[in-house]
Amino acid sequence: MAMRRLNTSAGILEVMGAPLTGTDLRAYVMSGGGLTLKNFRPRFRSKRCFLIFPVQGSERKGLVSVEVKNKKGQYDLKLLAVDIPMASGPDQRLFLIGDEEEYKVGGGLISELRDPIVKAMAASKEFDDLDQIEEEEDAERERQEGERRHQEEIEKLEKGGSH
């Protein structure tokens, strides 16, 4: 739902470049739901989901923040914002739905979710680099092992041929 809204937003597409694609990396927190008593009457509490995930356009990358409320089976977007890292200065935050006040709901829950995702995004680059180094080391070890076996075969043949 969030991706559909982002991919149909002229402003976001202009800044980030079309098409926008998400990734498997995401963090979310569910809150609410269940029964509560209000004025001695049972009521169903609405569920809220706070979700954050990276998104990439043809021009730029960004981090999407979403708050959605489930009211009687209907999803109501309360917040849809994209933080876009800028080459100079702080990230630029573009709001499609909601504002800075909505970003602070639940004691700034969405910004608390942001930190581990930002770290995971940075780590994935580091892991890619480590994978490359490890693959090169594995290939070198296999090459050396192959040479050692070849050398042993030659030595066996030389020993066998001298009798």
Image (spheres, helix red, strand yellow):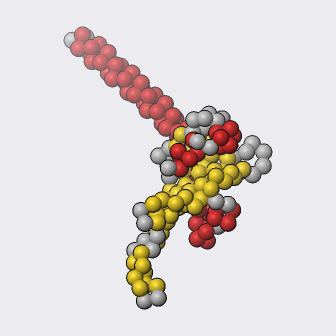
- Residue 114 visible? The answer is no
- Residue 138 visible? The answer is yes
Q: Residue 91's spot in the image, x, y percent?
A: 71, 50
Give the total of numbered labels.
Answer: 0
Left or right for 142, reference 98: left
Residue that extends furthest to the left in the rendered view of this protein:
163
Q: Quadrant of residue 149?
A: top left
Depth check, front residue: 92 or 119: 92
Q: Residue 50's spot in the image, x, y percent?
A: 53, 61
Relative to 39, residue 5 above or below: above
Q: Residue 69's spot in the image, x, y percent?
A: 50, 64
Relative to 159, residue 101 above or below: below
Depth check, front residue: 16 or 142: 16
Left or right for 44, reference 124: left
Residue at 41% x, 62% y is 73
Q: Residue 2's spot in the image, x, y percent?
A: 53, 50
Q: Quadrant of residue 162?
A: top left
Relative to 75, residue 127 above or below: above
Residue at 58% x, 66% y is 109
Residue that extends furthest to the right in the rendered view of this protein:
88
Relative to 50, residue 130 above or below: above
Residue at 67% x, 60% y is 99
Left or right for 125, reference 83: left
Residue at 21% x, 12% y is 163
